[in-house]
Image (cartoon, rainbow, N blue to C red):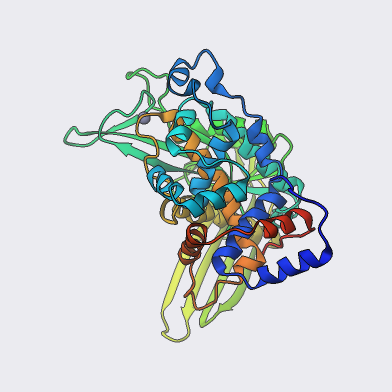
Amino acid sequence: MKTNAKHKSKKFYATVQNTAQNCSKGQLIIYQVYKTIKQFFPDLFERLGQLPDCRERKEYNIAELVIGGRKEYNIAELVIGGIAMFLFKEGSRNAMNNDRKETKFSKNYIRLFKLKLPHMDTVDELFRVLNEHELEAIKAALVIGLIEQKVLRKFKFLGKSYIIAIDGTGIASFDYRHCDACQTKTSKNGVITYFHNVLEAKLVTSTGLSISLATEWISNEGKTEYEKQDCELKAFKRLAEKIKKYFPRLPILIAADGLYPNQSFFEICKNKDWNFVVTFQDKSLKSIQEEITWLKNKPDGKRIIVRTEKHIRITLTYTFINDIQYKEYNLSWVECIEDRINSNTGETEQKRFVHISDIRLDADTAVKISDAGRLRWNIENEGFNTQKNGGYALEHKFSRISFLAMKNYYQCLQIAHTINQLVLKSQCINCLFDSDGKFTIVKLWQRLMSFLIECDISENQLLVIDNLQFQIRLT
Ligand SMILES: [Zn+2]
């Protein structure tokens, strides 16, 4: 985002700012998106501009045939087109193209991004040839930027490491072979389904942020039909390499589900110098289950915390054990029993959460490691659920024919979702949501789109943002 003019009077800025303070919710959020990109991702456009223009490379013959001859858009314009489709929660390429025909939308888009608005078919042509690692590297660089700006510092575990949740989810399924990399499953009556799953590493926080760090596709690429299919645990090995490559010195606490307590996982974490907290199911690692059953009667410690939320009294009973030997690993174990009593209805509910970790526990860290283990749920709720059902259309088939394009759309979605999460966590937007829940995120995005289609983004207001010092505060 370039600055158009620099020498304006203080009075000019004050007048524009006063106007902005009275602006509608749609207007408010669009300026907040602009501010968020400017403050947290100031080099996004520059990075996109430096992407190799694969449309010119000889190996991409198809690309040359299709789009090589007419390069009316530069690469940054095309990628921002893809990211904007998710920022605005358009839901499909077609919906974005329809809005593109609206004069005001098109004009506002150009004012906002200072870039041309491409037709989404042209974006798709690029995404079918753009190397999947390019956008992944940009996504990683954006997260590194956030970390360097210390935006996420207050969420560090024990003030030291970031909690990185690992989880997989389904992205697309077909009743025909979609590409060579499709995974397959055959039902009892012989019907074959072709599908694509993804494994994610996301930085999660107690305030509900779930920011994609790295992505690994679970894929049969390069395998013959006789070879064993790829699986989540194999994909984790590759994902771990990727995290280490992009974030070599980042202090990490890996939070993973009940699939992960095994020697291979412990070894990866140890080699990468990461701590971990993993959900521990009753059937996991039988050799240490017996030890735990015995030691549970004389644990290293217990702690009880009682709190009240509205009319519900919550009692959390933490029990922990240290020095559990499993091969060459020294593990700790923590159980949290959560009892909820509704003082109005008398209803009771009990839940049990069990985790193992390589961190030595005391009465304080036992509570923190158990809570960190439970934060893993954010990757499912804020991460996948919001991306599937909160307007991002994660499961929509943005490309029916190209696996590579599917991967590139996926990265655009992750970048857009990170930006939008920071927008929503800013104090000025967060305060729009009253405790009665009547004003929702869905309504806010409807206002945003109405504004873009029916009103005008003020160039003066953007100029004020470009030239004045501001600091977005996150809740
Ligand atoms: Zn496929």
Image coordinates of residue 159 in percent, x first then y, are 75, 54
Tell me if 43 is positioned left or right of 137 in this view: right
Q: Which residue lies furthest to the top in this view?
A: 58
User: Quadrant where the C terminus lies?
Assistant: bottom right
* Residue 75 vs residue 375, the one in the foreground: 75
Q: Which residue is drawn at 48% across and 34% down?
A: 123
Q: Is residue 242 left or right of residue 59?
A: right
Instruction: Report x, y in % for residue 119.
Output: 45, 38
Q: Residue at x 20, y 34 (%)?
A: 191
Q: Is residue 126 above or below residue 313?
A: above
In the picture shown, does residue 203 fall above or below 235?
below
Judged left or right of residue 106, residue 147 is: right
Quadrant placement of the N terminus: top right
Task: Say whether residue 364 is left or right of residue 119.
Answer: right
Give the residue drawn at x 43%, y 47%. Answer: 101
Residue 89 in picture, x, y percent from top left: 47, 52
Quadrant where ligand 1 appears: top left
Q: How many labels does the image show?
A: 0
Height in image: 189 above or below 316? above
At 49% from the left edge and 20% from the top edge, which residue is drawn?
69
Q: Is residue 283 visible?
A: yes
> Can residue 328 be seen?
no
Q: Decide: is 305 above or below 30.
A: below
Q: Nearer the viewer, residue 3 or 37?
A: 3
**In the figure, residue 207 lies in which quadrant?**
bottom right
**Nearer to us in this view, 225 or 349:** 225
Looking at the picture, how far across and down is residue 13, in whole percent? 77, 64
Extreme residue in the bottom direction: 344
